[in-house]
Image (spheres, rainbow, N blue to C red):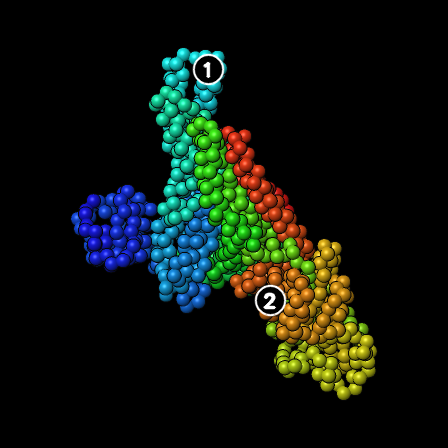
């Protein structure tokens, strides 16, 4: 390694400004740096194990491209726009969002350290890590910081970050499991062998043993313990060193201190042939700690299974069609909007788009919770990740990559699992100073017991204190519950997009519904056909549909849809003969056209009656005063007179009545606020059983009512369509939006009802309340365990290996308890 003067920056060779205190420890020596930039790069080089960069250079270079090793310069590739297309979402002109995967995360403290470090970078708007999946979401200002700089900053604290790739994550999880098993196997074999020899040593102390046999067994124990300490316990040292290097006290610091102190003392006592050895304790608590972490890792993987299943839904390849319908198998990364793709029965739809040819059923169960396949015909949208069931479909690709509905679902779910509710933030604050308190207590315990007894007793009790305390359980108490609950709700069709949503929903006292698009479908449907002149209802419907065919008006579409669905309209079958000619639309009044040589009109009664001046009797045949004022009525007539009335209503969603009753049964006060006519709102409120309702309200009126309730201490959950109710949804403590796939990317609510099944709201409340109970149980257990275990260890009632079991069991218990939420 080259030498530089004390006044020169070890990294770039420039003079170090007077008063600068930038430095980096390189190969055990503290080297001066001229600025924060050189210090950060040097730390990244050390963290990446690339210190040979300094060994092989002949002199510090002044060229920027020579100041960074080639391995780290490779991160700059991720700044290329063509490479970012597959994993970076552009929010606006300057803001970007990317999905990353972090390698090297071993515990909840790693999440805290990485989030704190990256969020402190100028230009980083948000950085959240999902502990269960090790996926991270980062949002940054492209003008202030580049993605490569963020990845380099992660590397500087000892982790490896790279763009998220489902196949790579699966490989990393398999490797993580394999390495953990190997370390566990070495620790298990070592502890068993050492324990058998330790039994002989213990028996020999009571029954007598030749000194050479006694010394021989201690040396054999030493040899068997070396692989356990050097290999199996390696993750504890790496994590502890990383924390210390970043001036943090992590959860592995006291564990590493205990292992190394016990092993060092045992080596010394073996060498001098005197004193107590702790080989059995060392190997056993390494084995128990690794066992606990292995079980916790498996539980963590299971907790994240839903989000993992979502990211693996898309196929690796797709069948692309060219202009001549020639099929080509291509990776889905090569698909672009405008491409045509063939999807055979049983295949997964590769991206979002519309059906161009064919008709089939599509299974969207994992996306929306809808258990039955949905019929898809020409012109209808299909969602990437859903499965084609019946017949081949030719689709036109509209959205790919990060713009698809599936990517939006995964992104929102990751955000919810990465954000922390109040209990989690409290746990992090406690864990932040918990380790320092433990180390201080250990020092006091060691001093006190050494003054009261001998060194061996003081060391044994201090080791127990260092090992038994478990801030891991505190930090795991809430994230595991959130991940398990959100996964279960997503499978049901209720997507959680904010971390606080479950905690707030569990404490909600009021639920406010919007009417249009929430309790009702938000579009008119034909609910009755009332013939006036003796025609059959199905012929009246066929005539109306012929006139409205091609209309974009909601009423026209409703009439056409009703005719298509009716099994009793043989004259209006696909390809049927009935059609209208010379159509003329009068805006605000209706449509006039000719069918089979006769002139018809459909629309407002006044417009229809104008065809014949003496149609008054026909109108009186069904007096408008007798009509339901909560519905829309459309008239159909010809030159001979009025033919029929069509009743159109905004129909209730299935399960609306049951959903309102279920929420009320759970003690929630339910209100209905709508901008629709008062009589229409009253009609719907009566149907679903809501006593408190208001109609004719503007968005500001709804907001004022919400604030009145909040001022009275109410915790309000607002349920709306996610579009018209944006101000009220934003003001409510927790908001739920009805969300079909096309609306999802624009939804800003805390939760989105993908299934659009209102009965899932009650299930969501139940899950939220169960989640809050389990989080509190976990929190109470974590605090109670540490308050009980620490005095027992300090009093000498726990041996080191018993402490290791207690620590492992404490962490495992909170994870297993959270996994109960996976049962919906």
* Drawn side of residue 89 relative to residue 66, left or right: right
Disc 1: CA contacts within 10 A as few (<14), some (14-19) or many (>=20)? some
**Element under label 1?**
helix
| Residue lying at 67% horizontally and 76% vertically, measured from the top left | 595
Query: Which circle marks residue 731 in the picture?
Result: 2
Evaluate if marks 2 and 1 touch, with contact meaning CB atoms under 8 Å apart: no
Percent position (x, y) of residue 338?
A: 45, 63
Corner quadrant of residue 598: bottom right
Corner quadrant of residue 324: bottom left
Determine whether 374 is above or below 590 in the image: above
Determine whether 698 is above or below 737 in the image: below
State the CA–CA distance, disc 2 to disc 1. 74 Å
Percent position (x, y) of residue 196?
A: 46, 20
**Element under label 2?**
helix
Q: Which residue is mark 1?
A: 204
Please identify the residue farthest to the left as the structure is shown: 58
Q: Nearer the viewer, mark 2 or mark 1?
A: 1
Q: Earlier in the sequence, mark 2 or mark 1?
A: 1
Can I make out residue 347 in this image? Answer: no
Residue nearer the viewer, 668 or 223: 223
* Drawn side of residue 741 relative to residue 96, left or right: right
């Amino acid at each position: 390694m080259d030498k530089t003067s004390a006044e020169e920056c070890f990294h770039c060779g420039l003079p170090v400004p007077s008063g600068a205190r930038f430095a980096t420890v390189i190969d055990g020596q503290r080297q001066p740096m001229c600025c924060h930039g050189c210090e950060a790069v040097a730390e990244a080089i050390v963290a990446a194990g690339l210190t040979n960069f300094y060994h092989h250079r002949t002199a510090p270079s002044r060229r920027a491209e020579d100041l960074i090793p080639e391995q780290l310069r490779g991160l700059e590739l991720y700044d290329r726009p063509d490479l970012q297309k597959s994993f970076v979402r552009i929010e606006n002109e300057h803001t970007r969002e990317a999905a990353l995967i972090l390698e090297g995360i071993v515990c909840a403290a790693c999440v805290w350290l990485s989030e704190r470090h990256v969020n402190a970078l100028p230009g980083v708007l948000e950085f959240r890590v999902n502990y269960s999946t090790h996926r991270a979401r980062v949002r940054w200002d492209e003008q202030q910081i580049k993605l490569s700089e963020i990845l380099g900053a992660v590397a500087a604290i000892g982790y490896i970050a790279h763009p998220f790739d489902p196949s790579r994550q699966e490989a990393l999880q398999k490797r993580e499991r394999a390495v953990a098993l190997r370390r566990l196997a070495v620790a298990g074999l070592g502890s068993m062998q050492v324990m058998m020899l330790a039994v002989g040593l213990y028996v020999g102390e009571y029954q007598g043993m030749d000194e050479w046999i006694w010394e021989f067994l201690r040396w054999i124990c030493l040899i068997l313990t070396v692989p356990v300490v050097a290999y199996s316990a390696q993750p504890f040292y790496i994590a502890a060193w990383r924390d210390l290097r970043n001036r943090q006290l992590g959860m592995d610091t006291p564990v590493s201190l205990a292992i190394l102190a016990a092993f060092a003392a045992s080596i010394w006592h073996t060498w001098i042939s005197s004193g107590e050895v702790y080989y059995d304790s060392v190997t056993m608590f390494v084995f128990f700690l690794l066992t606990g972490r292995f079980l916790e890792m498996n539980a963590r993987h299971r907790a994240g299974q839903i989000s993992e299943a979502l990211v693996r839904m898309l196929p690796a390849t797709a069948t692309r069609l060219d202009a001549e319908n020639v099929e080509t198998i291509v990776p889905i990364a090569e698909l672009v909007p405008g491409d045509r793709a063939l999807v055979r029965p049983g295949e997964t739809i590769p991206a979002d788009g519309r059906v161009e040819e064919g008709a089939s059923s599509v299974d969207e169960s994992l996306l929306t919770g809808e258990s039955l396949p949905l019929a898809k015909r020409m012109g209808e949208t299909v969602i990437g990740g859903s499965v084609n069931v019946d017949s081949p479909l030719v689709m036109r690709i509209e959205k790919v990559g990060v713009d698809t509905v599936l990517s939006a679902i995964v992104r929102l779910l990751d955000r919810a699992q990465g954000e922390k509710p109040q209990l989690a933030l409290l746990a992090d604050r406690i864990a932040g100073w918990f380790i320092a308190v433990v180390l201080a207590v250990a020092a006091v315990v060691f001093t006190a017991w050494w003054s009261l007894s001998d060194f061996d007793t003081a060391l044994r009790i201090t080791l127990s204190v260092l090992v038994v305390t478990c801030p891991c359980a505190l930090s795991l108490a809430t994230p595991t519950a959130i991940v398990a609950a959100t996964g279960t709700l997503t499978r049901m069709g209720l997507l959680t997009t904010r971390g606080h949503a479950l905690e707030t929903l569990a404490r909600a006292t009021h639920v406010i519904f919007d009417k249009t698009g929430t309790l009702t479908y938000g579009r008119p449907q034909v609910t009755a056909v009332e013939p006036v002149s003796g025609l059959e209802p199905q012929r009246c419907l066929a005539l109306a549909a012929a006139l409205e065919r091609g209309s974009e008006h909601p009423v026209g579409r409703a009439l056409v849809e009703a005719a298509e669905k009716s099994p009793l309209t043989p004259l209006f079958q696909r390809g049927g003969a009935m059609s209208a000619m010379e159509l003329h639309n009068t805006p605000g009044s209706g449509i006039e056209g000719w069918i089979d040589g006769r002139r018809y009109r459909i629309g407002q009664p006044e417009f229809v009656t104008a065809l014949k001046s003496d149609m008054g009797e026909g109108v009186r045949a069904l007096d408008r005063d007798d009509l339901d004022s909560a519905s829309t009525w459309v008239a159909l007539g010809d030159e001979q007179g009025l033919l029929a009335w069509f009743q159109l209503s905004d129909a209730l969603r299935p399960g609306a009545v049951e959903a309102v009753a279920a929420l009320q049964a759970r003690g929630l006060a339910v209100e209905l606020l709508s901008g629709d006519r008062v009589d229409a709102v009253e009609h719907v409120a009566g149907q679903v059983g809501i006593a408190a309702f208001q109609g004719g309200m503007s968005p500001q009126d709804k907001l004022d009512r919400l604030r009145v309730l909040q001022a009275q201490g109410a915790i309000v959950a607002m349920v709306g369509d996610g579009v018209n109710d944006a101000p009220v949804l934003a003001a409510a403590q927790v908001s739920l939006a009805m969300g079909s796939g096309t609306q999802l990317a624009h939804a800003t609510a805390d939760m989105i009802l993908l299934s659009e099944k209102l009965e899932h709201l009650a299930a969501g409340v139940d899950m939220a309340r169960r989640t809050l109970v389990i989080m509190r149980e976990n929190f109470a257990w974590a605090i109670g365990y540490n308050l009980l275990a620490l005095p027992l260890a300090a009093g000498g009632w726990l041996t080191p290996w018993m402490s290791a079991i207690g620590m492992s069991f404490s962490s495992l218990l909170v994870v297993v308890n959270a996994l109960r939420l996976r049962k919906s």
